[in-house]
Structure formats: structure tokens, C-alpha cells
């Protein structure tokens, strides 16, 4: 157990008791401090009085997204991971707009969940340096090739890698390779992080160049 993990409080919201017990055991084994909730309503009642922490939810009927949407309306911000039975481009776009870091399967492997939490920690650390990151991201975007910019622009718009490949008449493998290079150049931990860096910076990419639009401050989660 690392000191960093012990200082990381996770709010675990799961509406199925066996799954809640399993995830709780896995996260405790990984060294995280937990507080568990059995329903969306239970967490929402407690949320206004909770301290800083990370939210992991696994709720039926896409209620994990509804939970984050309600938190946004209340002006409450928790870096979040949602466990869901489905994942599609529309859900990913909605997740990004709600500030959700990652969508994982409800029956996610314990090591994958722990890995996602560590990524969330990295992203939160980046967010704490927001004043620095805006100019830094803009400078890093200048290092992208035209193809990389075209691909990132389409991914930010919510397209899948397969759809991007079809639009640009290139192979999916080419899209994946370009996306990987872009993430390294922007120091993004995953695709959701890459998209959020672009959106939070108020940055618009285009095939003919790079334009920076006015940065609009946001309250709470995106």
C-alpha cells in the first residue's frame, strides 16, 4: 500500500451488493481508502457534505451518467469513473461533457479498475495546474501533424476511430497510430484525457491549421 493510495478517498456507488463487495475488496487491496453507497439517492443525500475524493459508480440503466448529471446541476465536482454495461460514441461524448474520466465494463477486472483510478489521479493533478496547462496544451498542439490534427478534431467531435478512418480513407491502424502519437505529444494518459485537454483549453483544430478560440471558464464539472 502506497502513501499516495492511502491519501486517496474513493466514493464507491454500486446498486448490486455482490458487485459492491467485490469492487470494495479489490480497491482496498490496491490500497485505496473507501466510502461505499448502495444507491444514487444515498450518495446524492451525502454529496454536499463530502470532502475531496474520486467517484466510481456502477448503477443499472445508465444511472451512473444520471448521477453525474445531477451532481453537475448541484454544482458539485467529483472526478469520476462510470462502470456501464454499454459503451458507444454517444455515451463517450456525454461522459466527456459531464466530466467523467472513463467508462469501463460493469464486470471490470480489478487490475483494470485500479489502473483507471491511477490515471484519474494523474488527470486530477494536471487539472490542479490548469493555469499552466492551457498555454502548455496550445504549444504542444503545434507539434501535431496535419493528419494528427484531423484525427483529433474528429475524435473530439465524438466519432469512433473506425468512422474517422472511413472519412479520411485510411486504415484504422493508421488512425490508432496517429492517435497514440498525439496522446504522447499532448502528455494525455488516455483518449478521454486527450479530448478533455482540447475542450478545456477552448481549442479548435482544423485540417488547414490550428485556431485558438476564446477560453470560456467553466464552473464545476464540464
Image: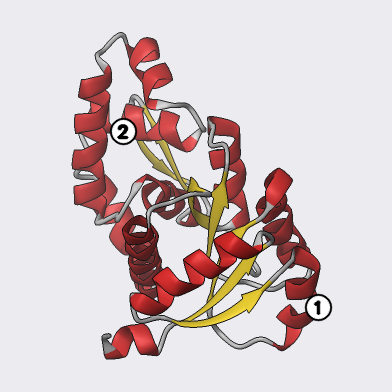
Question: x%, y% of residue 99?
Answer: 56, 58
**As drawn, which residue projects farthest toward the front?**
18
- Side (left or right) of 181 relative to 133: left
Q: Residue at x 50, y 72 (%)?
A: 24
Q: Quadrant of residue 164?
A: top left
Question: x%, y% of residue 62?
Answer: 69, 46
Q: Residue at x 32, y 53 (%)?
A: 138
Callout 2 crowding tier (Cα within 10 Å): few <14, some 14–19, many ≥20: many
Q: Which residue is mark 1?
A: 45
Q: Secondary structure at mark 2?
A: helix
Above-or-below relation of 217 to 164: below
Q: Residue at x 77, y 61 (%)?
A: 70
**What is the quadrant of the C terminus in the image?**
bottom right
Judge whether residue 212 can be spotted in this image: yes
Seen from the viewer's position, the closer of residues 193 and 37 is 37
What's the distance in space between the residues labelled 2 and 1, CA to CA? 43 Å
Question: x%, y% of residue 160?
Answer: 44, 26
Q: Residue at x 36, y 35 (%)?
A: 152
Seen from the viewer's position, the closer of residues 56 and 142 is 56
Q: Quadrant of residue 128?
A: bottom left
Amino acid at each position: 500500500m502506497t502513501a499516495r493510495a492511502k491519501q486517496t478517498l474513493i466514493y464507491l456507488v454500486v446498486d448490486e451488493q455482490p458487485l459492491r463487495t467485490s469492487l470494495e475488496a479489490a480497491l482496498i487491496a490496491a490500497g485505496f481508502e473507501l466510502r461505499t453507497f448502495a444507491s444514487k439517492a444515498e450518495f446524492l443525500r451525502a454529496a454536499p457534505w463530502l470532502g475531496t475524493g474520486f467517484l466510481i459508480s456502477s448503477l443499472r440503466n445508465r444511472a451512473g451518467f444520471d448521477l453525474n448529471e445531477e451532481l453537475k446541476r448541484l454544482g458539485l465536482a467529483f472526478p469520476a469513473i462510470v462502470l456501464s454495461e454499454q459503451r458507444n460514441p454517444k455515451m463517450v461524448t456525454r461522459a466527456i461533457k459531464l466530466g467523467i474520466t472513463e467508462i469501463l465494463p460493469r464486470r471490470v477486472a480489478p487490475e483494470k479498475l485500479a489502473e483507471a483510478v491511477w490515471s484519474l489521479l494523474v488527470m486530477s493533478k494536471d487539472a490542479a495546474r490548469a493555469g499552466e496547462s492551457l498555454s502548455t496544451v496550445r504549444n504542444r498542439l503545434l507539434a501535431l501533424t496535419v493528419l494528427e490534427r484531423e484525427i483529433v478534431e474528429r475524435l473530439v467531435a465524438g466519432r469512433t476511430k473506425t468512422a474517422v478512418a472511413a472519412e479520411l480513407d485510411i486504415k484504422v491502424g493508421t488512425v490508432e497510430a496517429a492517435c497514440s502519437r498525439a496522446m504522447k505529444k499532448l502528455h494525455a494518459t488516455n483518449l478521454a484525457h486527450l479530448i478533455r485537454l482540447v475542450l478545456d483549453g477552448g481549442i479548435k483544430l482544423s485540417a488547414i491549421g490550428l485556431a485558438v478560440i476564446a477560453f470560456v471558464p467553466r464552473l464545476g464539472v464540464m
